[in-house]
Every structure is written in structure tokens, then in C-alpha cells.
Amino acid sequence: MRLNLQNKPIPLYLWAALISATFLLHGFSAFGLPVGIFADDFVQIALAQSLRHGRFGFLDWMHLPVTNVMPAFPAMLAAPAWLAEPHWAWLRIIPLLSAWMAIYGAWRIARASLPPTEAGLTAALVAIHPSLVQYTGAVLPDLPYVGLTAYLVWRFSERKERGPIWGLAAGAASASLMRPFGCLLALSFAFALWRREGRRGLQFLAVSMAPLGAWLLRNRLASGVASGYLSDWALQMQAKASLWEQTKNAGRIVAFLFVRSLALLDGMPAWPTAALGMGLLALACYGAWLFLRQDRGAWRLAVVGYTASLLAVYATWNVASGRYVLPLLPFALLFLFLAARDLLSGYRLPAGLALLLWSSLAFRRDAGIARRADFSAPETLSQTMEWIRTNTPESARFQAVNAAQVLVMAGRPAASPPWDSSDAATWFDRSKRDGFQYLLICPRLRPSGYSNTSVERLLTELPKWARGQGAAVQYRNDEEGTAVFRF
């Protein structure tokens, strides 16, 4: 007998209890984490503020062009940030609503492939996934992107052949400007339309990719670099000198995504983890094949193409993070569910036990996230920011790892340290050349994005270098782990 819950629907009151508990969990996580706990929160807010001044860049004295942050989310954030200022905690409503949109979209996508009860269970797996729960309060583009992606795929699935494509193209263009891999969604949609409907796919490609092309051209003209992401990717590829190194890195990334992030299994030795990762990847590929077999809809080809291309890009990246699984969640979990449903046909007990085990692992991590909630701290480093705002002149120029937070919360011009400084004298000379007057030390913070040993060394050495060059401590906060030096 096939694993099929269609004839035994889950009672309505159980669905109501599950949905209510999930909403409560998401709200508790979103409003229990202070704004700024993720390094890029204030980067997005600072760029949203800059758009109100007619430019896209940090409002400091250097006026350097920003090329490694996509513009769509700051543009989306501009009006809410203006309304919320200075109560930044209210901005957490945006990722929270985006998470719910992603869950609803995942359910609608699953409904095209599964009976109602099983589609609901697939959406529930997305809803309780710890990565989604953890980022419901992050003022970042990750969850808005996932919500937009799920919505676009759902609308694509309901589009009739030869139906309008311009709304989808506009949505795909927005996705391309929200996350760097959003272009993979646009390309996958265009390829699927081309395979099924000919030149309409080329029309879709032109409309959906034109805004991204304009953005890359702007970056090239402003800074000489089309995209900071491409520069980071090139640096990482150079670090993997041989095909063997690239293969090992791809295996490590696949194991991280499928074992630690999707299967939620931690603490296993490297080789069993790699083997299990490859097994889960094969299972997902089988599920994708089953997904494609159900009908000839162009949207199915687009979903599989997007998921495969995103995995291929991830496999070339050195850094692995829990948030990287978010764009894959609605599709990878559906593929795994379809494969398990087919392979466990006639074995309801093992299927139920596997579902129960995964859910218990998810809820265990979710409970850990909820336990860390702190509703008394709406923003990080609030005491330090208050001291800077009240004890330094408005024109004071700060050097800080969290420069965007100093810009937003303290209202002081700020920029990052000269990362390529090799010693104290070089760092001090460059700092004076660039006009820095104050240095904010935050040992607990790290810059977002790709990092390396020289960056880590600079962050470790900064307090010692500052003292060695005669910078005086103006303020220290042991509770927040910060110190302010005056050059």
C-alpha cells in the first residue's frame, strides 16, 4: 500500500493547532532577537536610508560605491525604515511576513504534486525548519527572496500555456536584484519557456535580465567592478588550485546542505557525513525526476533547473552557512518527500518514524532558538551607540567593523577598517590618510560575507595596534564587549 494520507485527512483542529503553534514560534523568534544580531541588518537599513538622499551607498565622507549588496531589498525597505525610525525592531515584520508567504507558496507548489494532506505536511516541514525559524527576525533579503521565489513558482504553475509572461518577468527581475543568484531563477524560467513555447522564452529572458544588466553596468562604471560577489567568487576559486580540491569542496558543501541543514544531523565523522550527503542528493534527484514526470508543465522544468543550478553554484563556494539552505527549502524538501513517498510505498511505519524523527530534531533546534530570545534588547550594542551619539560631535568619523550600525543608530559617519593592512604602522597611516578620528572595537563581531586570515588577524590585532600608536580609550563597555579609541 502506498504511503498516502489522502483517505485519512488530519483533523481540522490539529491543523489549527499546528498553524497557531508555528505562528507563535515564528513571532517569538522574530521579536526575541535584537536587530543587528546578524551583521548585515544595519547594512540594509543604512542603504535604504541612502536611497532617500538620492544615492545608493553609505552616507559617510568617502562616498565609495557599493557593489556587493543588491539594491532590491534596500529599495523595498526604504519606506518602512523611514516610518519605523528609530524603532528598528518593527522592521522585523517584513521577514516574518515573507516567511509566511514562503510557507504558503510551498503549500501551493506541493498541492500540484501531492494530495492535500501530504502537501500540508510538506509545507509544515518548511515552516518548522530551524533555518527559516532563525531568520524570521533578520532584516535581510533572504526570507523576502524565498517568499518571492515561492510566489513566482506558484503563479507560474497556474499559468496556462501561452498565457501572459510579463508579470512573471517583472517578478523574476526583482528576484535578480534581490539576491545575486536570483538571476538563476530568471534564466531557469526563460529556458523552460523556450523549451515549451519557443521565442516567448527569449522575450522573457530579455525583460527579466535587463534590470540586472543595467545594475552591473552601473557598478562597472562606478567602481570598475561589475559585482563584488563575482570578485569574491573569483578569489575563492583561486584558492582551490586543483580539480581534486574543487571536488572535495563540492562534497563538503553538499554534505553541509543535505546532512546538517536539511536532514538536521550533526556530530557525524567526515566520511559518513559525505556519504550520507551524496545519498540524500541522489534521493533528491530521484524526487526531482518524479516531479518532472507528473506533467509537461514548463514550470516543473523551471523548478528543477533552478534548484540544480543553485546547488551547482553553492558547490563552488568556500563558505557554508545555515542561511544558504533557505532558497532551496520549498523545492528540496518537496523532492525528498516525493522520493521517500515513492520508495516507502507500503511501509507506513518506517515513513511515520522518519517523519517523527526529523520533526523532533527540528523542534529541538527551534526550542534552542526560542530559549535565546531576549525581548528586552531590541537592538545590539544599544548602550555603546547611545554613548557615541551623546559624547562625540556629529562630524566625528568612526572606523568600525559594524560601520553601518554606527551610521544608523549613532548618526555618525563611519567606514570599515583598511582590511589589507599588514602591520600597525601601515594600518595607522591609512587610517589617518582616510580621515578617521575614532575607532570602535567590537571583538564579538565579524564582517559579513567572505572573510580570510588577513581580516581575522586585523580584527584580533586592532586593540593592540591602537594602543601601540597612542590612541586613547574614551569609553569601554564590558557588558557589550566594546571600546572606543580616539586617534
Image (spheres, rainbow, N blue to C red):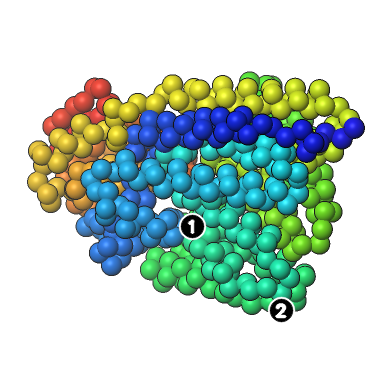
Residue, x 30% and y 52% (percent of image)?
81
User: In front: 448, or 87?
Assistant: 87
Neighbours of disc 2 within 10 Å: few (<14), some (14-19), many (20+): few
Q: Is residue 43 left or right of residue 283?
A: left
Q: Is residue 355 left or right of residue 360?
A: right
Q: Is residue 390 left or right of residue 61?
A: left
> Looking at the image, can residue 190 be seen?
yes
Question: Label 2 amino acid?
Answer: Arg
- Which residue in the structure is indicated by mark 1? 178
- Which residue in the structure is indicated by mark 2? 199
Q: Quadrant of the C terminus?
A: top left
State whether residue 271 is above or below residue 333: above
User: In front: 397, or 205?
Assistant: 205
Q: Residue 428: x, y in percent?
A: 24, 43
Q: Residue 139: x, y in percent?
A: 40, 45
Question: Label 1 amino acid?
Answer: Met
Q: Residue 475: x, y in percent?
A: 15, 30
Q: Are marks 1 and 2 in contact (CB under 8 Å)?
A: no
Q: Which mark is residue 362?
A: none
Q: Residue 78: x, y in percent?
A: 33, 58
